[in-house]
Image (cartoon, helix red, strand yellow):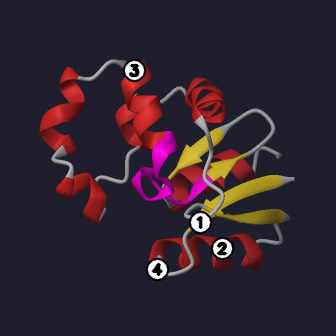
Amino acid sequence: MINVYCYNRCTTCKKALKWLEDNGIEHKVIDIKEDHPGEKELKKYHKLSGLPLKRFFNTSGIQYRELKLSERLKDMSEDEQFALLASDGMLVKRPLLVGKDFVLTGFKEDEWINRLKQGV
């Protein structure tokens, strides 16, 4: 089963969920604002993803801009970044797709097709 962290007002999340449904891929939706991943989960997801930690930040979000994270992240340790991400689900890039042995951030249809067509 795939977990999809989403925000119900996010148009990209809606598009991603529709894509999953249209492709018959079973998934569980988790409200990222109410039930966001903690530090331990984020560290695990980061490792599984193979992505730079910055890809886990919602760089177009209001909080990201208000906290001036585009300037501050480079001076923060990974532990500080994980703590910050865990503090507010709205800082986390969405949708966050979590499978058994992989994690994808954001909805890039080509990435999702390549990963999900390999088997979940």
Q: Residues within 10 Å of mark 1 (few under 14, many from 20)?
A: many
Q: Amino acid at mark 1?
A: Cys
Q: Which residue is mark 4?
A: 11
Left/right placement of residue 41 relative to residue 74 reads: right
Answer with mark 1 or mark 2, whichever residue precedes in sequence: 1
Q: Which element type, helix, strand or loop, lies under badge 3?
A: helix
Left/right placement of residue 38 relative to residue 65 reads: right
Which residue range is magenta in the image?
A: 86-96
Q: Which residue is mark 1?
A: 6
Q: CA distance from mark 4 to mark 3?
A: 29 Å
Left/right placement of residue 106 relative to residue 36 reads: left
Can you tell which of label 3 and label 1 is closer to the viewer?
Answer: 3
Can you tell which of label 4 and label 1 is closer to the viewer?
Answer: 1
Name the residue: 55% across, 60% down: 95
Answer with mark 3 or mark 1, whichever residue precedes in sequence: 1
Can you tell which of label 4 and label 3 is closer to the viewer?
Answer: 3
Q: Are marks 4 and 2 in contact (CB under 8 Å)?
A: no
Residue 8 appears in the picture as rendered: yes
